Amino acid sequence: MNRRLRQVMLPLALAASPLLAHANADVEKLTADPKNWAMQAGDMYNQRYSKLKQVNDANVNKLQVAWMFSTGVLRGHEGSPLVVGDMMYIHSPFPNKVFAMDLNTNKIVWKYEPKQDPAVIPQMCCDTVNRGVAYGEGKVILQQADSMLVALDAKTGKVVWSVKNGEPKLGAVNTNAPHIFKDKVITGISGGEWGVRGFIAAYNLKDGTPAWKGYSVGPDDEMLVDPNKTTTWIDGKVQPVGADSSLKTWKEDQWKIGGGTTWGWYSYDKALNLMYYGSGNPSTWNPAQRPGDNKWSMSIWARDVDTGKVKWVYQMTPYDEWDFDGINEMILADINVKGKPTKALVHFDRNGFGYTLDRTNGALLVAEKFDPTVNWATNVDMKSGRPQVVSKYSTAQNGPDVNTKGVCPAALGSKDQQPAAFSPDTKLFYVPTNHVCMDYEPFAVEYTAGQPYVGATLSMYPAPGSHGGMGNFIAWDAGTGKIVWSKAEKFSVWSGALATAGNLVFYGTLEGYLKAVRKSDGKELWKFKTPSGIIGNVFTYEHKGKQYVGVYSGIGGWAGIGMAAGLEKDTDGLGAVGGYRELNQYTDLGGSLTVFAIPAAN
Amino acid sequence: MHRVILAAVAAGALGTLAIADDKTPAVKTDLYTVVDGYKVDPNTLKGFRTWRSAACDRCHGANQEGLVGPSLVNSLKTLTKDEFKAIVTEGRLEKGMVSFKTSKAVMDNLDNLYAYLKGRADGAITRAKVEELKE
C-alpha cells in the first residue's frame, strides 16, 4: 500500500523540488520496481515484502536450486545481497569482500576487498558478521568492520570516498548495514560490550562529508534533543522530555561508557521526513554499577533525516538488567490499531514485547508479549509505558554475585536482529523468534579502554515446560497484539523473513533449511537444505522474466556461538535438553549464497 | 566434556566420603589448592575473577568448554605456561584472540589465571565457578 502511495507521490515531489532529494528519488524508483532488491529490507519501511508472485503457494514445491556462489569466508553470513537491474552485489563477513556479479553471465565484474587491521576481529567477539551493503546514485556503500564507511563506484568497484565512523581501538566497530535515506548515508556503531557510547551518524551520499551525529546518551545537545520540542510518552500522553533527560538518569559519568549502540536496521517515512531505529543496552551488564533509568539506552527513536533532531523517543526497558538490547528493526506500516487506521511503527523487542506506536508522535498503542513464556515482566503499564518487573527475575534486586535463574527470554531476546516481514495483503507480521531462557549472574567489573566490559555470566537453554525447541516462527497481529499462528522450530529462527504476494513467507533455519510456509496458517509447503546454517535474510528478485529467491548460508553470529551454550550446565540439568548442542549434528561453518527458481517446463 | 562430568561425579562421591571420614579431600599442587572441587586458595580465586572480568567466557564458554574460541579445558592440557602467557599478552588476532596487554587486571594476574585454568584442565577444579577456601 505504501509503495503505491509513493509511486503516486514521486512525480509530484520531483516536480515540486527538482533540485532536492535526488538520491532518495533514485532509491525510491529502484525499490518501487519489484524486479530489484535494492535495499536490505526491500524498501524504506523495513517491510521485507515483494509483489512478485510467479513463485506462489500453488507451485513452490517445484522450487529448485538455480545457482550457488561461495564467498570464500567461513563465518556468520547475515544480511543479503542487493539486486539492481542486471547486477547483484554480494558481501561477506570480515574481511568484508564485495562482489559485483552480472546476472546475465554470473561473471564477477569487480571485487573489492579492503585491508583491515586484524586487531578488529577479537573486538567483534564473538563473530565477524556484516549485514550488507546499500545502493544509491551509482554507488555501493559498505560499512566495514573497522568502522570505515566506503562508497564504491557501482560500475568499477573503485573507491569514490571513505570516512572513518568510529574508533576501533576502543571497541567501536561496525556490523550494521548502512542505509540510504534521501541524500544521506545513515550508519550506527557497535561495541555495547566494550563501553562504547552509542550514536547514529549521517554522511552526505555525494562526498561522504559528515552531516550530523546524534548520541544515544549524554547532554541534550550531543543527542540532538530539544528539551521543549522532543517528546516522549509520560503519564499516558506525548509530552516534552525536558532538560537533561538522559544525564539525570545516570550515576555520575557512567553515561560516557554507557552503551546504547545502534547496530540494527533503520527505516524511513518520507512523508514525515523521519528515520526510525533502536538503541541498545546500557554498559555494563551489571546493573548495580549504573543505578537509574539509563536513558536513552533501550529506546525507539524518531529523527529528522535532514538535521538529526529527535522528534520523539520512547524507552522500552528502563534500567536494563538482562541485556535486552533494543536495536531490533522498526517496521512502518499503515494498519488498523484497535480498529483505528494508524500510521504505525511496529517493533519486536529483545525483551519479548511486541510494540505498536503511532509513528507520527511516538504515542504508545500496544505492548504485548509475542512469546507466552516471557516472565521477567508481567506486562507493560500503558500509562507510564514501563514494564512491570517481576522481583524474582530482577538481577538488580537479587544483586551482584547472585545467580538469577529461569529468566525468559534469555539475553539474545525473544527476537534478535533477524528482521521480521510485513504483508500488506494480510496486514500481519511474520516474525522469526527465539524460545530461550537464561540464568544471569552480574558481577562488578572495571572499565579499561579497548577491553571487554561485560560484567555478567550467562547460561542459556530452551524455554522449560514448552515444546523443547529453541525457536518459533509466528504470525502477529500488531493492531491487537496477538499471535495469529505459531510454528515451533527446533532451533532459534535467526534468519530474516520474506513475505511475498505469492501467499508465501520464507525463512531460514539454523540447521540450514530454507523454508516456504503459507501466509494464512503457517503450513510448511517446501524446504531445502543449504550447505550451512542460515542466519542471513531471504530476498527475491526477477531477472529475464523469472522470479528468483535467495539466501546466504553460513552459520555464526550469537546463534552460532550458542551452538554450544549450556554444554556443561552445572545447575539444573536443563542444558542436556535439546538445545544448541545438537546443532553440530546438522551443520558446520559455511559461506555461500544459494539462489532458487522454478525450472522452465519442458 | 565427559571427562569433566565424570570428575564432578567422582568429586561428589569423595565429598560424601569426606564427611564420613571427617576429613576434607584436597588437591594441592605447586599451582593451586582445591577442596571439594570448587573451594580454592586466594590466588586461584583471583584467577577465576580475572577470567570473569575479562569476559573470556564470551569466546571460550561459561565452563571453558569452547565456543568461537577453543576449549581451554583441552588447550591447557598441552600449552606450556610460557606459551599461555604469551598468547594472553599478545593475542592471536587473526584467530580472534584478544591481546590483553593493556589490561592491568589481566597482566597482574597471569599466574593466577593460569593456575585456575590449569586446575580446570587437570580436572581438579570440577566446576567453573569457584569459591574461597576458608582455612
Image: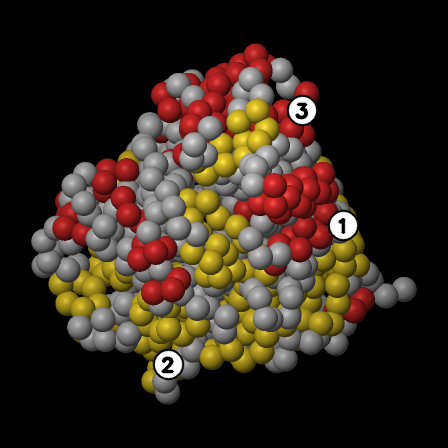
Q: Looking at the image, is mark 2 or mark 1 earlier in the sequence?
A: 2
In space, the residues marked 3 and 2 are separated at their CA atoms by: 61 Å
Q: Residue at x 42, y 19 (%)?
A: B107
The Cα atoms of the two marked residues, 3 and 1, are separated by 26 Å
Q: Chain of mark 3?
A: B
Q: Residue at x 23, y 61 (%)?
A: A312
Disc number for residue A337: 2
Residue A585 marker: 1
- Where residue A421 appears, as percent x and y from the top left, is 52, 65
Mark 3 burial class by Cα count in 10 Å: few <14, some 14-19, many 20+: few
In-front residue for pair A300/A470: A470
Q: Secondary structure at mark 1?
A: helix
Q: How many marks?
A: 3
Q: Is residue A310 left or right of residue A129?
A: left
* Image location (x, y in percent) of residue B99: 47, 21
Front: mark 2 or 1: 1
Element under disc 2: strand
- Quarter of the image for residue A166 reads top left
> What's under tag 3, amino acid-wise?
Lys
| Amino acid on which the number 1 mark rests in the picture | Gln
Q: Residue at x 67, y 50 (%)?
A: A581
Q: Which mark is residue A199?
A: none
The answer for which chain carries disc 1 is A
Q: Is the same chain shared between marks 3 and 1?
A: no
Residue A327 showing in the rendered view? no
Residue for badge 3: B77
Task: Assign a secondary structure to mark 3.
Answer: helix
Residue farthest to the bottom, as pictured = A339
Residue kind at label 2, given as amino acid type: Val
